[in-house]
C-alpha cells in the first residue's frame, strides 16, 4: 500500500455526476487547488450495502464540511450512468437520492490504481494475456487534500468496514488548527481541546495537565 501523505495527490480527469444528477465529462480536483480542502473518498460499488450508509452520512454532514471550506468528492469503479441511476433512486429502494456532492466514475480503474486502493491487480502471462487477481473494486480509501493539492491524511478500510464521518471531520479540524495556530494536535484532540507546541516543553506541559 502506497503512502501518499506529504505527496501531491494523483491527478485525474474523469466523468462524474455533480449536483445529484448532472453528468460532466472532465471532472478534476484541480478546480479546488488554491481554494479549498478536499476529502476524496473511494467506495467499492453503487447499489451495495455499506456504501449507501457512508454516502448518505457524508451528505448529512456536508454543511459542516463546507463551513470548513472543504469539498467532499466520492469515487468508485462504476460508470457515470450507474452513479446517475443510484442518485435518482429513493432511499427505500436502496438508492442515495439527495446526495449532491460529486461522484467520480473510475470505470478504467486508473484512479483507484494511482491512489493504490484497488483491491487487486492486473497480471500478464508469458503470452501477454492479461488477467485480474483480486476484486476489481476499490477499498474504502479516504484522502484529506490541502489547498496546495498535497495529501495530509489517508485512511484505508477493508470493504466490510464502514468509516467514521466524525473522524474525517476531526482530521479537517486538526489540519486547519495546525495551519492557523502552529500548534500540534495530540491523541483524541477535537476542536475546543488544548493543543500543544511541538517541543519537549510543550509535551511536558500538556501531559502535566491531563
Image (tube, grey):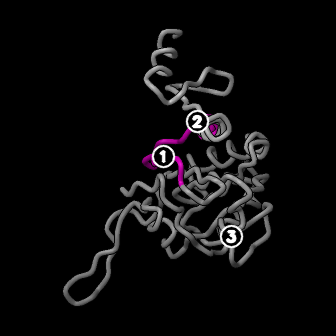
Q: Does residue 17 appear left or right of residue 188 in this picture?
A: right
Quarter occupied by the N terminus? bottom left
Other-residue count near label 1 (Cα within 10 Å), few / some / many at <14 / 14–19 / ≥20: few
Residue at the image point whose x is 51% and y is 26% from the top: 186
Judge by depth and name the residue closer to the eye, 21 or 75: 75
Residue furthest top as drawn:
209
Residue 45 at x, y = what percent? 55, 59
Residue 198 at x, y = what percent? 50, 30
Tell me the SS state at disc 3. Answer: strand
Q: Which numbered disc flags the more N-terminal residue, 3 or 1?
A: 3
Q: Which numbered disc flags the more N-terminal residue, 1 or 2?
A: 1
> Does residue 190 lie above or below 109 as drawn?
above
**Residue position for label 1:** 155
The Cα–Cα distance between marks 1 and 2, rounded to whole angstroms, is: 10 Å
Judge by depth and name the residue closer to the eye, 135 or 94: 135
The residues colored magenta run: 151-170
Which label belongs to residue 16? 3
Amino acid at each position: 500500500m502506497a503512502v501518499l501523505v506529504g505527496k501531491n495527490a494523483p491527478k485525474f480527469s474523469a466523468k462524474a455526476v455533480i449536483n445529484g444528477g448532472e453528468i460532466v465529462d472532465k471532472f478534476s480536483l484541480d478546480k479546488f487547488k488554491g481554494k479549498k480542502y478536499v476529502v476524496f473518498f473511494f467506495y467499492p460499488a453503487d447499489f451495495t450495502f455499506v456504501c449507501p450508509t457512508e454516502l448518505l452520512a457524508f451528505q448529512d454532514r456536508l454543511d459542516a464540511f463546507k463551513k470548513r471550506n472543504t469539498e467532499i468528492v466520492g469515487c468508485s469503479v462504476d460508470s457515470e450512468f450507474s452513479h446517475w441511476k443510484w442518485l435518482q433512486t429513493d432511499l427505500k429502494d436502496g438508492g442515495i437520492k439527495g446526495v449532491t456532492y460529486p461522484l467520480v466514475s473510475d470505470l478504467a480503474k486508473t484512479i483507484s490504481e494511482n491512489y493504490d486502493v484497488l483491491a487487486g491487480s492486473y497480471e500478464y502471462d508469458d503470452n501477454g494475456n492479461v488477467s485480474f487477481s483480486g476484486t476489481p473494486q476499490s477499498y474504502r480509501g479516504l484522502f484529506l487534500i490541502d489547498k496546495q493539492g498535497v495529501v495530509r491524511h489517508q485512511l484505508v478500510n477493508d470493504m466490510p468496514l464502514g468509516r467514521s464521518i466524525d473522524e474525517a471531520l476531526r482530521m479537517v479540524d486538526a489540519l486547519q488548527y495546525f495551519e492557523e495556530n502552529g500548534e500540534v494536535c495530540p491523541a483524541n484532540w477535537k476542536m475546543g481541546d488544548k493543543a500543544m507546541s511541538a517541543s519537549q516543553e510543550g509535551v511536558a506541559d500538556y501531559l502535566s495537565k491531563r
